[in-house]
Image (cartoon, grey):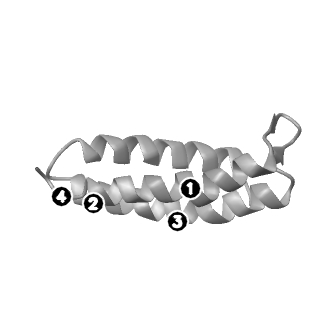
Amino acid sequence: MPYPSFINYVSGGLEIVLAIGVAYPKTRLLAVKGILLLLIAFIPSHLYFIQVGSCVDTTFCVSPWVAWIRLLIIHPLFMLWAWSVRKTP
């Protein structure tokens, strides 16, 4: 992907904005939908990370099983959490 640092900063900024949006009842549903879309959009990057041996430029490496746990367990748990907070109390 072109400009990976830019994409990383933009997605991080979106995560922060959407997290703030979850805190307010008026924007909660829209923020949850945005979080779910981001989590779905991140799936290919998680798969790529696993394909390249769970390392990024030899600076960040984890065991392959950690990458799989992140993709198959933690990622869906985040999606379930986002879906569970969609309604205002």
Q: Which mark is residue 87?
A: 4
What is the distance, in whole Å, between disc 4 and disc 1 at their CAs?
24 Å
Residue for badge 1:
73
Q: Judging from the image, what secondary structure is the residue with disc 2 in?
A: helix
Q: Nearer the viewer, mark 2 or mark 3?
A: 3
Viewport quadrant of the N terminus: bottom right
Residue for badge 3:
40
Q: Earlier in the sequence, mark 1 or mark 2?
A: 2
The three-letter amino acid code for the residue at tag 4 is: Lys
Between residues 82 and 20, which one lies in front from this camera angle?
Answer: 82
The three-letter amino acid code for the residue at tag 3 is: Ile
User: Vertically, is 2 above or below 58?
Assistant: below
The three-letter amino acid code for the residue at tag 1 is: Ile
Q: Position of residue 51 (x, y in %)?
A: 83, 61
Q: Judging from the image, what secondary structure is the residue with disc 3 in?
A: helix
Q: Is residue 8 left or right of residue 24?
A: right
What is the distance, in whole Å, between disc 2 and disc 3 at their CAs?
15 Å
Q: Which residue is found at the position 58% from the left and 42% from the top?
A: 9
User: Vertically, is 25 above or below 2?
Assistant: above
Contact, mark 2 vs mark 3 (Cβ under 8 Å)? no
Q: Earlier in the sequence, mark 2 or mark 3?
A: 2
Between residues 66 and 31, which one lies in front from this camera angle?
Answer: 66
What is the distance, in whole Å, between disc 3 and disc 4 at their CAs?
20 Å
Residue for badge 2:
30
What is the distance, in whole Å, between disc 2 and disc 4 at their CAs?
11 Å
- Residue 87: image quadrant is bottom left
The three-letter amino acid code for the residue at tag 2 is: Leu
Q: Earlier in the sequence, mark 4 or mark 1?
A: 1
Q: Judging from the image, what secondary structure is the residue with disc 1 in?
A: helix
Q: Residue furthest top?
A: 59
